Image (cartoon, rainbow, N blue to C red):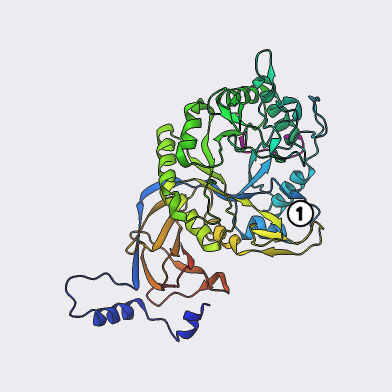
Amino acid sequence: MSRALNRRVRPLSFKSAMALSAVLTAGACGSIPDPVNVSVTVDTSVTHQTLIGFGAATAFQSNLLAGRTDDIFQVLFVDSGLDILRLGNWYQNQSQSTSTTTAFSDNNAVEIVQNATAARGGTPPKILMSSWTPPAYLKSNGVTRPPFGSGANAPAGTLIQSGGGYDYADFGDWWARSLQAYAAAGVVPDWISIQNEPDFYIPQWETCVFGATEGATVAGIPAAGYGQALDAVAGAIAAAGLASPPVVLGPEPTGFNNDNVQHYLDGLDTSKLGGIAHHMYGSTSDNPAPDSFEGAMRDVTTSGEAEGLPTFMTEYQPNAPTMFDTAWLINDALTVENVSVYLWWELVWSNQTPQTGLVSIAGGSPTAPYTINDLYYALKHFARWTDPGWVRVDATSSVSAVRASAFVSPDGSSLTLVLLNTDGKDHLVSVDPGAFSFGTLAVYRTSGDSERATPVTPESDGSITLPSRAIATVTYTP
């Protein structure tokens, strides 16, 4: 518990605090908002987006999970409540630049999916697969990534040209063959993104640039068109006769400021998409203020509503993330943008300072210890007590510093409310669930140095002590 709570012998009940506030403000002119007590009202009759889920990626450093036989998969895929695993499409042979055939070698992804499925009692996590680059034979620069030491002069790559045009057909064929190869190994994506961050290039990294329009300059070169590439991949998948063809998401650029998502959407056939995907990079701050994204979020919401498509936030991790700001940003994404999916970047990562993975692993050995980082709990507060298919409903707070989001199960029997105190002082929160009837109320709070999604007892009237920068998940069950 926080020091503030340790000093408090017994928190005031909501009614007692209200009475004390009335005494302190007696004689004041007019109605003064209570600075301590907060009321949150839930209206389950007003519905918003349907949740598809929360998750994170093992597209890189997947070797950290290879060969492990401890309980880490229980921690990652059960205890956290995460629903979605994001993988890279690594169906390529980076040592060959002219081969059109590739032996399957992504055994780490296969093992991770198998172990996650076993931990989940036989049900695999939902899988999003993004491509960072096609094989070298399809690249204009002839490599999947420029070699180390090439520096800033290394050229960016887009699709190779063939017969006077970009080779979209072979790009589509590679995607179809890669899905067949992964399926044969037991990895069947629910969604794919044909190119991770088509607007981004950096030397010594797997990238492939695509323009919002064909021939547009990206990273200093004229790029293949994202829309044409999308058409080719969608067509190749349809022709391949896959047993479980994936839904295609896009355009998945680095960020959504300056109408970046909208520029790409303008150049593609949105009927080929099952969702609008984007990342949230672009800020110059190591840990940007969560509310600074609100304008861009609203713009993407407008685009999603116009196209009748759900929005997916498929990757984000600032340079110096904090647990509370991460939870705050998830809340904003859910309540401002109405995202159906929120994915953190690093599910597991090597040990470093600051920690950026949900779980860090000290070394590559299967016996190396792992550490659950505070960031893990930011996602757990939203993911553990909701599931795909839950619907966000209205939750209104009387004090803007206390943020709230609420979700109802598909059968209408359970309600989950997530509260965040963005203020510098403690609050006492009273929740009115409206017409929702329940049998059991439970509270899980993260606060101070020791509480991490810890069960706490609410006041006798059901109100909840919410210290400064605390997160609380409140569940109402039959």
Position of 301 compared to 343: left or right?
Answer: left
- Amino acid type, callout 1: Leu
Residue 257 placement (x, y as % from top left) = 47, 42
Q: Is residue 376 magenta?
A: no
User: What residue lies at 47% left-to-right and 28% top-to-bottom?
Assistant: 266
User: What residue lies at 61% left-to-right and 30% top-to-bottom?
Assistant: 220
Position of 125 compared to 96: left or right?
Answer: left
Q: Mark 1: give few (<14), some (14-19) or many (20+) Cα within 10 Å.
A: many
- Magenta-highlighted residues: 183-193
Residue 426 placement (x, y as % from top left) = 41, 73
For residue 461, which quarter of the picture? bottom left
Q: Residue furthest bottom?
A: 9
Q: On the image, numbered disc 1 is attached to which residue? A: 64
- Tell me the element at label 1: helix
For residue 204, which quarter of the picture? top right
User: What residue lies at 42% left-to-right and 70% top-to-bottom?
Assistant: 424
Q: Is 256 or 49 nearer to us in this picture?
A: 256
Residue 16 placement (x, y as % from top left) = 32, 81
In the displayed structure, 411 sits above or below 202; it is: below
In the displayed structure, 25 sits above or below 434; it is: below
In the displayed structure, 3 sits above or below 233; it is: below
